[in-house]
Image (cartoon, grey):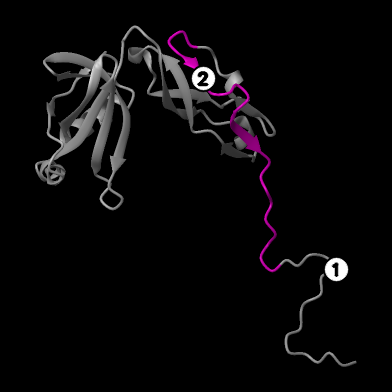
Amino acid sequence: MAVSLKVEERAIRPRSIRNKLRHEGKVPAIVNGYKVESTPISIDEREFSRLLRENGANTVFTIEVGGKKVNTLLRETQLDTFTHRLTHVELVSVNLSEETEAETEINLVGEAVGVKAGGTLAQTLYTVVVSATPEKLPEGIEVDISGLEIGQSISISDLPKNADYTIVTDADEQVASVQEAQELPEEGEVSEGAEPEVIGGSTEE
């Protein structure tokens, strides 16, 4: 289901207009893609951030540019290094009937039996690329790790198929594994046969 997002077309000159927009609580943005010429726009920062929190980054945003409604996906956001506030947004216009690719998060669920037995869980892949029509792009993929024992792992090829999307990421990519816990030497323990170094001692016999 698409979410309505209010945008306003903006000028690109002078350069100071970006600072003026940010002072008004708006974010400079641009939209391009399917049947849309590259168009500079502005978005209310607070409203856009709320919609992202409530719906996720793979949401279809319906906007109005040039007098017509356009369905878009979020392609990129830029954040200020220090304040972490949005400084620029790029939207891409899409055809709702055509598949597109997007990145989505991997969420591990359950507690591995190997961890209960003393092993250590290691997640090696945090996002995957999926292909789907825009309105069926998942916000995240849950991976059940409860059956993992020590020495076992889960790869992309082990994940169940889903009718709504196809995972594009290489099937051999490992998602998570349970490893045997590493035992750390106790404090003060010295390896067998090692002799303590004498600092400042005489080397004469």
Q: Taking the image as drawn, is residue 84 in sight? A: yes
Front residue of 196/48: it is 48
Q: Is residue 9 left or right of residue 56?
A: left
Q: What element does badge 2 sit on?
A: loop
Q: Is residue 146 left or right of residue 102?
A: right
- Mark 2 vs mark 1, CA separation in Å: 53 Å
Magenta region = 162-188
Q: Is residue 7 left or right of residue 143?
A: left
Name which residue type carries label 2: Val
Q: Is residue 143 above or below residue 86?
A: above
Please say whether residue 106 is one of the residues in the magenta stretch. no
Q: Earlier in the sequence, mark 2 or mark 1?
A: 2
Residue wearing tag 2: 168
Name which residue type carries label 1: Gly
Residue at 70%, 59% in the rendered image: 185
Where in the figure is residue 110, as x and y percent of width and height? 51, 28
Q: Which secondary structure class fits the magenta region best?
A: loop
Residue at 15%, 20% in the rendered image: 65
Where in the figure is residue 159, as x and y percent of width and height? 56, 19
Please say whether residue 167 is one of the residues in the magenta stretch. yes
Where in the figure is residue 109, as x and y percent of width and height? 49, 28
